[in-house]
Image: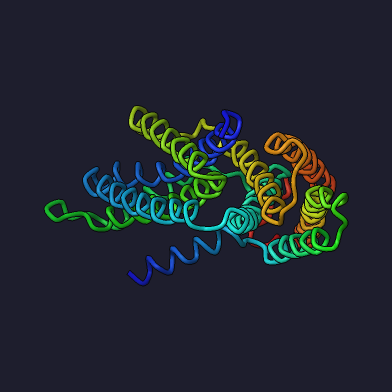
Amino acid sequence: MDVLNLAVAAAPSFIASSVEFVEALTIVLAVGTTRGWRGSLAGTALAALTLAVIVTVLGVALVTYVDRHVLQLVVGVLLLLFGLRWLRKAILRYAGVVALHDEELIYRREVAELRAQGLRKKEWDWVGTVIAYKAVLLEGLEVAFIVIAFGAAGVAAMNAAIWGAIAAGVLVTGIGVALKHPLTRVPENTMKFGVGAMLTSFGVFWTAEGLGIEWPGDALSLFAILGVILVVSWVSVRMLAAMLPSGARVEARNV
Amino acid sequence: MSDLLRAIWENAYGLLVDDGSLAIGALAAVAITWLFASIAAESAERLGGALLLVLVCALVIANLYAAGRNARRRIS
């Protein structure tokens, strides 16, 4: 596997995982600052262990034992569904139809809820542990899915995708520990837009490959697919902006 | 424990399906591409990827147009 294919697996995995780690970090910080760090870090460590088992068992088993075309098709379709969901939400946010994702607001809401639950200082904080575990596990499941999807090309791609995700985790955690505050300055909405477009592009690419269709230029065609998806996304944002009065926002579940 | 398992299942399902019509549309696009790839002549088979891309793009625009109409109806 050449450098281009490895970069194609590692870079999107890094960016997509960063977004998920930022969201998990917000909850872990909220638990840590309101209820103490022992429960928060224990929950995080347990969730990381659970995820490592999931990625190792599923990921390695998939790329080692499942037929390449079948794996590409299954991963491609899942990636297409996953990517379209992200892209749709990102376009609706950019067009002003639904509210932008606000990490500061989520952090404050979480802190208020955790404080309201009270704390017994002499006992192990199971509430904090479970909340941190659930947050890291659920956001981490998305990371696991991303890693498995981007690493579907084979063992080398899987390793590249895993290292991309690990690098994102180390970077986000490092900055979070240094700042002790949610990463509100990370352009999360823009990153989500980019990730949605990338996931959809990979979904189209792998699905077609899984159906036995060859792309001209192989992995290089991913850039052309991404370009088309980005143009369509921009057209969609303009279309929605023209359809709705400016400043009008509705609940995401209503669209 | 059952709460956690339910949360994991809901999260896993929610990862893939947010809007049912978009998910069904994506699966239909894959099925059409598969049909095309199975019946097309070998020389035209390479167009299958482009067909899937066009179908996905059309699906995105159609779904968001419907979402925009829904949102406009709720606002007015």
Place of residue A188 in the rendered image (x, y in percent of width and height, measured from the top left): 56, 37
Q: Is residue A12 left or right of residue B26?
A: left
The mark total stands at 0
Place of residue A244 in the rendered image (x, y in percent of width and height, measured from the top left): 80, 50
Q: Is residue B39 visible from the viewing direction of this image?
A: yes
Q: Is residue A121 left or right of residue A97?
A: left
Taking depth in this image into account, of A182 and B44 the one nearest to the observer is B44
Q: Name the residue rendered at 50%, 65% in the picture.
A: B10
Place of residue A73 in the rendered image (x, y in percent of width and height, measured from the top left): 64, 57
Q: Name the residue rendered at 75%, 40% in the picture.
A: A225
Taking depth in this image into account, of A237 and B70 the one nearest to the observer is A237
Instruction: Using the image, determine if residue A54 lies above or below residue A13.
Output: below
State the residue lying farthest toward the left.
A122
Instruction: Using the image, determine if residue A39 lies above or below residue B28.
Output: above
Q: Is residue A219 left or right of residue A46?
A: right
Q: Is residue A247 left or right of residue A77?
A: right
Q: Quadrant of the N terminus of chain B?
A: bottom left
Q: Name the residue rendered at 21%, 45% in the picture.
A: A38
Taking depth in this image into account, of A135 and A32 the one nearest to the observer is A135
State the residue lying farthest toward the bottom.
B2
Q: Is residue B76 visible from the viewing direction of this image?
A: no
Instruction: Using the image, determine if residue A235 lies above or below residue B75.
Output: above
Place of residue B7 in the rendered image (x, y in percent of width and height, measured from the top left): 43, 65
Q: Quadrant of residue A119?
A: bottom left
